[in-house]
Image (cartoon, grey):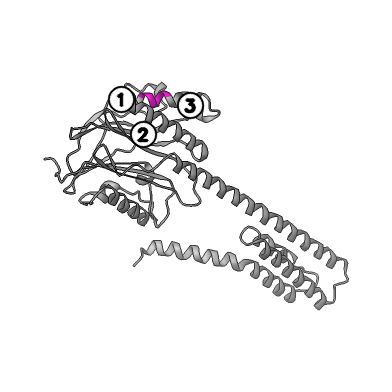
Amino acid sequence: MGHPRRHGIGTGVVGARRFIRALPTLMITGGLAFDLATPPRFTAVPLFAAAPLIAAPFFSWLTTLLTGLVATVAMVSLRLYNETVSEVTAYTEMFTLITVSGLALLINRVVRRGGERLASARVIAETAQRAVLPTPAERIGGLRVAARYEAAQAGASIGGDLYAVQDTPYGVRLVVGDVRGKGLDAVEAVAVVIGAFREAAEHEGSIEAVAQRLERALAREGTRRDGLDVVEGFTTAVLAEIPRGRGGVRVVNRGHPEPLMLYADGGLEVLEPSEHALPLGMGELGSGPDRADEHPLPAGGTLLLYTDGLSEARDAHGVFYDPRERLRGRVFPGPEELLDALTADVRLHTGGGLSDDLALLAVRRPGDGRHPA
C-alpha cells in the first residue's frame, strides 16, 4: 500500500493535468453557453480567445491550431444564429480571434524550441559528465571497487559531482567531490579536478600533498573565470589513500559529507574528521594545512564515499535520506551490490526522482573480517 500523503500528491497532480487538458474545451463550451444565455450586446470573445492561449504552452502546434479554428467557428456560428454576422463588431471579433490564435501558435513554437534547447543542453552536459567519469575497474590494487553516477530528474540541471580511483606507488588513492555550480561550467571544473587528481596521485608522496595540488589547480582555474566563480568557486571533496599491506585508510575531508565504513558483520562507522576544513578552492580564507585521519579498513570492510545528492535527497514530507540509518546492520556481498541497493533505496525514498545528481564510490578490502572491538 502506498503512503497516503504521497498517494494524495500523485492524485492531485493527475487531476491538475486532466483539468489543464480540458480547459480549452471548457472555455469554448463556456463561451457558447454564455453567449446563448445573455443578450446580444454581451460577447463571449474573451472566453473563445482564452482557449488557444491556454492550449499553446501545454499542447502541440496542431492542437493549438485546431483550438483556434474551433473557437473562431464557434464565434461565427453564434453570429449566424443571432443574425448579427454582418455587423462591424462581428468582423472585429473574428479579426481578434484570428490574431490571438496566431499569437498562440507563436507562443507554442517558442515554448517548444525553448524546451528542445534545454533538453539538448542537458544531454550535452550529462554526456560530458559521464565522459569525464569513466567506470573504474572492478579490482584495483587488490581492492574491489564500484562507482556510480546518478543524474537528477529531467527538470534539474546537471551538477558537478565527481569521483576517481587510481592505483599509485603509494597505494590506491581516490576522491569524491562536488563542484559548486551546475551545467557545462561545473562539468568543466570536474575535468580540472579529476585531471589534477590523477597527476598528483601518481607523484605526490602523501594524500595531504594531493589535496594541496587540487587546491592550487582550482585557484588557477578561478583566475581565468568571470563573475561569481572568481570569488565563490569551490569544491567539497573527500580524498582517501589505502596503502598496500596495511589494514587502514587515510582520509582528508575538505568540507564534504563524511564517508562511511561498513563492516562485514553489519557494523557501521561514520568517519568524522578530527578537524573540519574548508572546501577546496577556499584556501585563501585561512584554511590550515591538511591533516589526514587514519581509520581501520579490515578484511571485508567497505569504504563508502558519496556526494550530498544522497544525504540531501528528500521524501514527500521533506525528510532527508540518512544513509547511516538505512545501511546500519545490513550486509552486502560486494561494493556493486551495495551501490545497487543504495540507489534503489534512495529512489524509493524520494518517490522515483532525484532533485540533485549524486556520485557514489565504494571500495572493499577482500576477506570476511568483523567490526573491530
Residue 246 in the image, given as x and y percentages of width and height: 18, 32
- For residue 279, say whether it is visible: no
**310 relative to 20, above or below:** above
Residue 145 in the image, given as x and y percentages of width and height: 29, 43
Task: Look at 26% across and 28% down and name the residue there.
Answer: 170
Secondary-structure class at tag 3: helix
Residue 319 in the image, given as x and y percentages of width and height: 35, 51
| SS majority, magenta | helix
**Sequence order check: which comes first, mark 3 or mark 1?**
1
How far is the residue under mark 3 from the one under mark 1? 20 Å
Task: Compare residues 300 and 325 and report the one nearer the observer.
Answer: 300
Residue type of the residue flagged with mark 3: Glu
Pointer 2 and pointer 3: residues touching (CB < 8 Å)?
A: no
**Magenta stretch containing residue 310, yes or no?**
no
Which residue is disc 1 drawn over?
208
Which residue is disc 2 drawn over?
237
Q: What stretch is highlighted in magenta?
A: 212-216
Binning the other alpha carbons within 10 Å of mark 2 as few (below 14), some (14 to 19) or many (20 upward) gives: many
